[in-house]
Image (spheres, rainbow, N blue to C red):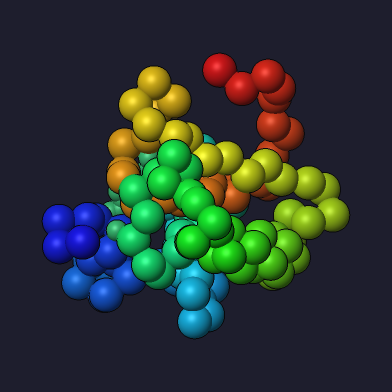
Amino acid sequence: MEDCLFCKIIKGEIPSKKAYEDEDVYAFWDISPTAPVHILVIPKKHIAMLNDISEQNSSVISKIYEAIPKIAKENGIAEDGYRVVTNCNKAAGQTVFHIHFHLIGGRELTWPAG
Ligand code: 5GP
Ligand code: ZN
């Protein structure tokens, strides 16, 4: 996707602070963090949002969830706890239309989310 911000980040056309990378998954620090640890975990292949997950592309979601505990441990939040959030579409506050998983931790998190 030529106009996609996160595709540009994956290609290195826009700089990012890398937290993790493998064949299918890239993770980088959020530019506007809401907690001491706020990392975005994304598939390298463009998928716009959760509504677009299907039997054909859902294997990358397992890869993302395999990466998340590794990233959490590496950044010292696995023991205390963390939250993983995906905003799907406008009413949920999705602003970048390349699916991403916010990995948030390093402080006490309130619930329910707003
Ligand atoms: P959404 O609102 O779509 O769930 O989350 C998009 C996230 O991307 C936001 O938390 C925002 O701070 C982050 N973001 C937007 N542009 C950039 C960027 O250029 N670099 C990085 N690292 N994060 C970004
Ligand atoms: Zn994209």
* Residue 90 x/y as whole percent: 34, 26
Left or right of 6 on screen, residue 72: right
As drawn, the residue found furthest toward the left would be: 3
Q: Nearer the viewer, residue 66 or 57?
A: 57
Q: Residue at x 24, y 56 (%)?
A: 5
What percent of the width, then of the height, locates residue 4?
Answer: 22, 55
Residue 90 appearing in the image: yes
Residue at the bottom extreme, as displayed: 23
Q: Is residue 75 visible?
A: no
32 lies left or right of 107? left
Q: Quadrant of residue 45?
A: bottom left
Quarter occupied by the C terminus:
top right
Viewed as shown, does residue 114 lie left or right of 66? Answer: left
Quadrant containing ligand 2: bottom left
Q: Position of residue 80 (x, y in %)?
A: 82, 48
Residue at 48% over, 49% down: 53
Q: Observer-nearest residue: 38 or 62?
A: 62
Residue 49 spot, x, y in % from top left:
40, 44
Q: How many marks?
A: 0
Q: Is residue 80 left or right of residue 4?
A: right
Image quadrant for the N terminus?
Answer: bottom left
Residue 28, compared with residue 48, is above or below; it is below
- Residue at the far right in the pictured view: 79
The residue sitting at 44% across, 39% down in the picture is 51
